[in-house]
Amino acid sequence: MYRTVFDELFKLNEEMGRVFNTVGYAGVKRWPETNVYENKDEYILISKVPGMKKDEIHLSIKDNSLTIRGERKKASNEKARVHLDERFSGKFERNFLLNEKIDIDGIKAETANGLLMIKLPKSPESKPKRIEIK
């Protein structure tokens, strides 16, 4: 992968989010928690989305930026008094900027056991090609 000025800005944004989260700034949410992997053929994103159905999660990709958005409803029990409420609820949106072009037609996503797995194959033109010397 190549590095751009946007990589540095992304790292700065990540660090600012981490700092504000540690001091209790409620405006910065990292939900769903996501791991991003890369191999020579694809990116793989795995997000924790416990209790959500696939029709409650919306995925889109534009200009090599993947967006995960949706809304997690708050479980309510009107007869019970809440003593502690730590589970995230409400609208969410996460964006992931990818360094390489993606084969949009080959994207696959599935959800099972509270996890969302998204496979983003790299487009053929973004893969390295060997040049033969004659």
Image (tube, rainbow, N blue to C red):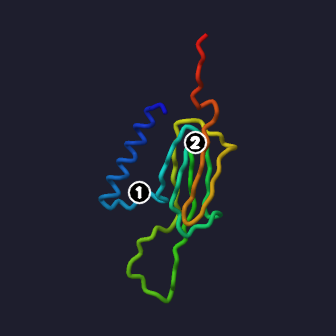
Give the class, few, some or many, for how many residues have Cα within 10 Å of label 2's Cα (few <14, many ≥20): some
Alpha-carbon span between mark 1 and mark 2: 29 Å
- Tell me which residue sits at (51%, 84%) in the image: 77
Residue labelled with disc 2: 42
Q: Position of residue 1 (x, y in %)?
A: 49, 33
Residue labelled with disc 1: 28
- Tell me which residue sits at (51%, 66%) in the image: 90
Please state which of the two labelled residues, at mark 1 or mark 2, is closer to the viewer: 2
Q: Nearer the viewer, residue 60 or 134?
A: 134
Query: Relative to residue 42, is residue 1 depicted above or below?
Result: above
User: What's the amino acid at mark 1?
Assistant: Val
Q: Nearer the viewer, residue 2 or 20?
A: 2
- Tell me which residue sits at (47%, 59%) in the image: 31
Query: Relative to residue 78, is residue 52 depicted above or below?
Result: above
- Tell me which residue sits at (55%, 36%) in the image: 100
Q: Label 1's element?
A: loop
User: What's the amino acid at mark 2?
Assistant: Glu
- Quadrant of the drawing holding the C terminus: top right
Q: Is residue 86 left or right of residue 113?
A: left
